[in-house]
Amino acid sequence: MKIETYLTLFSFLLILVSCEKQLDQTPESSLATDNFFTNNNDFLQAVNGVYSQLNNYPSQALWLSEMRSDNINATSDGNRDWDGINNFTPNITTTGFITTAWRANFNGIYNANTVLEALQTKAGALSASNAIRYAAEVRFLRAFYYFSLVRTFGQVPLISTVKSAAEVASIPRSPVADVYALIESDLQFAATNLPATFTGIDLGRPTAAAAKGLLGLVYLTKSGPTYGINGPGLNSNEYDKAAALFDQVITGSPFNFGSGYANIFSYTNENNSEVVFDIQFASSLNGAGFPSHLAPVAYWTSSGISNSFGNGYGSSTFPVSKSLVNAYTTNTVSGTDLRYPFNVATTYAPGPFIKKYIDVPKRGLSGRDWSINFIVLRYTDILLMKAECILHGATGSQADVDAIVNRVRARAGVGPLANVTLATLMQERQREFLGEGLRWNDLVRSGLAITQMNAWRNADGMTKVNEIVPDYIIYPVPAAEIQTAPGLYTQNPGYN
């Protein structure tokens, strides 16, 4: 990897984000770690600093997962960074979104390792209970960053302690199974040692249920097909293990099924009971940019709002695919799908786009200053993943699957289904989680990525999209990382 980027964010400096709304995060500090970690406040600030790289995750979710999937048929007005992602081209090794995903996650891992080392070497500076809690938070975050890397790139360097630049430059990519072993160990520790809830200024920190839910998703992802590549699926058949963890969240946590779909994403109802884990944003402090990402610039100007709320991509547009519009509008066993008009701008002339997170009166100072949190894992996702496990052979019945899916459909205002299949479940997930960055990973772990994406490509007449092949299940290693240490990494097959 590019050593200087990996080390500078926390190269014996604490890079801390400022967020008054949640996490009580303090302003940036440049105290050297040798003179830091002398009291509980120092550790708390450092732990809060590990959260800072989460701010990049919504962009990864939208540009690398939503854009990669059959949810969006983007149109370009030039050579745009996302073109190759949307079109499945092999020459994307220098694409900014891909490079940033690699570096941001490894920066987060380095921050986490630095705090974990300090918890070992300077443990006398804080109480035993706080030491365990901070370790649990940081290990959750390290697992989160590594899981993001595995799903995006497959094999990655496994770095679980603080390393010098020279040491990092000699660490090769590890087998995916080895990376998963660290992820699982971290999440098991977190699930055991994190509290059931956080309140007040600590809202937004991961809970025990968040760790269990994420670990369940890890097992579910590992259980997916290999596609014959070194990707996130290991065909490990751990569906029962995943389902057991989902059950613990469903029946043994303070989270529950949200009432009213739109209410889950309301600016005035953040951290509601549906939200198992989210990323916290606050206008004018660490405002979010993701609500503006997939809204064309012309939408803002035609609405009489400054184009500073645009995404910087000129006249490019990001229409919701024809197939997905059809999936919403024909999803009418009875009633009309309430998720469609909430998720999608249906009357915008150049084409429908995802408006899920846009509440114009709640806008901040620019398109990078929204105050809405980004939900990473919610209760409905836990329910539907349990149904997915059952369809793969975990304990449960077809009636259980149908009941879960129809509970979700009832909230959406549409009638029930019978004998739900994996394909039907995935289509329900597509409608439910549009704009949440789940679709591509859903298709990959379900084994439907190749067949579904190529079917969509043909059905929607996507001539600009290359045929999807197994190599494209994961992204390329960024060219800059390969060039930094020639011969250390080999490029993922299918990319140049």
Image (cartoon, grey):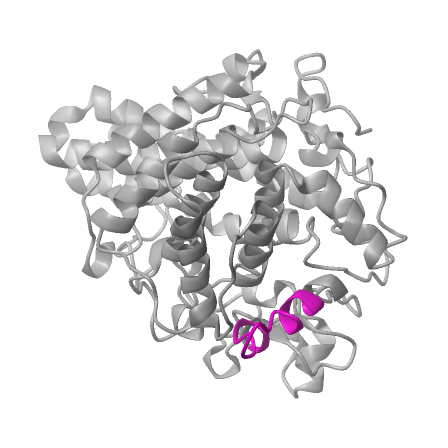
Residue placed furthest toward the bottom: 304
Q: 373 or 326: nearer the eye? A: 326
Q: Position of residue 97 (x, y in %)?
A: 66, 45
- Is residue 224 shown left or right of residue 477? left
- Is residue 385 shown left or right of residue 431? left
- Asked if 347 appears above or below 309 in the picture, the reply is below
Indicate the quadrant containing the C terminus: top left, top right, bottom left or bottom right.
top right
Residue 340: in magenta span: yes
Q: Residue at x 58, y 78 (%)?
A: 341
Q: Is residue 419 visible?
A: yes
Q: 433 or 459: nearer the eye? A: 459
Q: Quadrant of residue 134?
A: top left
Q: Is residue 10 visible?
A: no
Q: Residue at x 56, y 48 (%)?
A: 421
Residue 380: in magenta span: no
- Is residue 464 shown left or right of residue 302? right
Q: Quadrant of residue 245?
A: top left
Q: Position of residue 358 (x, y in %)?
A: 54, 74
Q: Quadrant of residue 113?
A: top left
Q: Position of residue 273 (x, y in %)?
A: 29, 62
Give the magenta part as a residue range: 325-341
Indicate the quadrant containing the N terminus: top left, top right, bottom left or bottom right.
top right
Image mark count: 0
- Asked if 328 appears above or below 181 in the picture, the reply is below
Q: Position of residue 75 (x, y in %)?
A: 81, 62
Q: Residue at x 55, y 13 (%)?
A: 171
- Is residue 192 shown left or right of residue 77? left
